[in-house]
Image (spheres, rainbow, N blue to C red):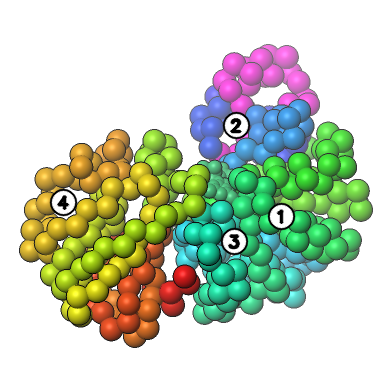
Amino acid sequence: MENDIICIGCGSRLQSEDVTKAGYLPASALKKAIEDERADVYCQRCFRLRHYNEIMPVELNNDDFLNLLNSLANKKALIVNVVDLFDFSNSILTSLKRFVGDNDFILVGNKFDLFPKNSRQSRIKDWMRQEANRMGLYPKEVFLISAAKQKYLDELIEYLNKASTDRDVYFVGTTNVGKSTLINAIIDKMGDIKDLITTSRFPGTTLDRIEIPLDNGHFLVDTPGIMTKNQLATYLDAKDLALVSPKKPLKPATYQLLPGNTLFLGGLGRIDYVKGESTSFTVYVPREVYVHRTKLEKADEFYQKHFGEMLTPPKTTKDLPEMKGKEFKTTYKSDLLFGGIGFITVPEGCVVKAYTPGQIGLGIRRALI
Ligand code: GDP
């Protein structure tokens, strides 16, 4: 439905075509607003925020995001990049480098609850910092949190409280990192800002973002999530996405392997042991991912035959990029990363070839556990 009605909460043009995009309002409600010539219409997202103190995720493409970031260049702001610890390299926003300028920037690693219980926070933070530095980003602080479980949030909230006394706080992130869950948790914890959320805003002053007023006169600003082609989440349908999004900590499983063995991580990952001694690999993936060991020489055929049936997830997703591999040699005990699914710890001195659909999310780091 074509119209020029703007949501008075976030300034987006109202639309009823895509629930994941900014300005969404169900068709019936939009029709009624047009008929009644109302000037105070909220999109569904702003409505939920006003009435239930609940943020809904929206998506934006990269160009729109860059425009939004441009508006930050001359402002004093704190920028909070929320990242998924299980898909780190695809959820850190390299485009931030150009816009952070003199502003402070912090990294918030979400889904920490999924790390095995004996994980060391300091190691994980060091790794995040190193990766960020490699991309030319220098976070002032690094936090590990669980938005869904509302755990480890106090330190972050205290930091935000202090930092927001003289500037607004912008939350940025790719889709599915848990940014909405985090903001909802913060709203929940900062109980006293709840009443202020209903403060009305002037129409058209913001671009696809939601500003949550703080009682110090500044705002927490939620920006839409950025879609990227490098995330597995972009390709999976909702059912399969749920299968690879665990709620409980990942349980390690150890496999004794010889060169010439292959391990499948459902239909979404594969590792060939190319060269090395007989040794054990430790797999950290959600319980729903079926791990299967087979012979390398039969692996291609096995995948063709059992993809989506024994090798699941995916169970329902139809179109995935073709599996593509990349060779890695471990010069120390390393984690092979399968972004969005999990990781496999491989001992020193092994040559392996790791595969994911279209090489999405492949990477390596010094073993964390
Ligand atoms: P957004 O697109 O960044 O706003 O992400 P959402 O807040 O919609 O969350 C994406 C998915 O991640 C959902 O399935 C959440 O349940 C899940 N999620 C969010 N935070 C956490 C967390 O702390 N731990 C775990 N295990 N899952 C989380």
Q: Earlier in the sequence, mark 3 or mark 2?
A: 2
Q: Earlier in the sequence, mark 4 or mark 1?
A: 1
What is the distance, in whole Å, between disc 4 and disc 2 at their CAs?
40 Å
Q: Which residue is mark 1?
A: 153
Whether pointer 4 and pointer 1 mark residues with C-beta atoms closer than 8 Å, the reply is no
Q: Which residue is mark 4?
A: 303
> In x, y percent, where is residue 282?
34, 65
Whether pointer 1 and pointer 2 mark residues with C-beta atoms closer than 8 Å, the reply is no
* Three-letter amino acid code of the residue under disc 3: Gly
Helix or strand or loop: what does disc 2 sit on?
loop
- Residue at 69 percent across and 42 percent down: it is 184
Crowding near pointer 1: few (<14 within 10 Å), some, many (20+)? some
- Residue at 28 percent across and 48 percent down: it is 290
Residue 18 or residue 334, whichever sits in front: 334
* Three-letter amino acid code of the residue under disc 1: Leu
- Residue at 59 percent across and 41 percent down: it is 57
Q: Which residue is mark 2?
A: 24
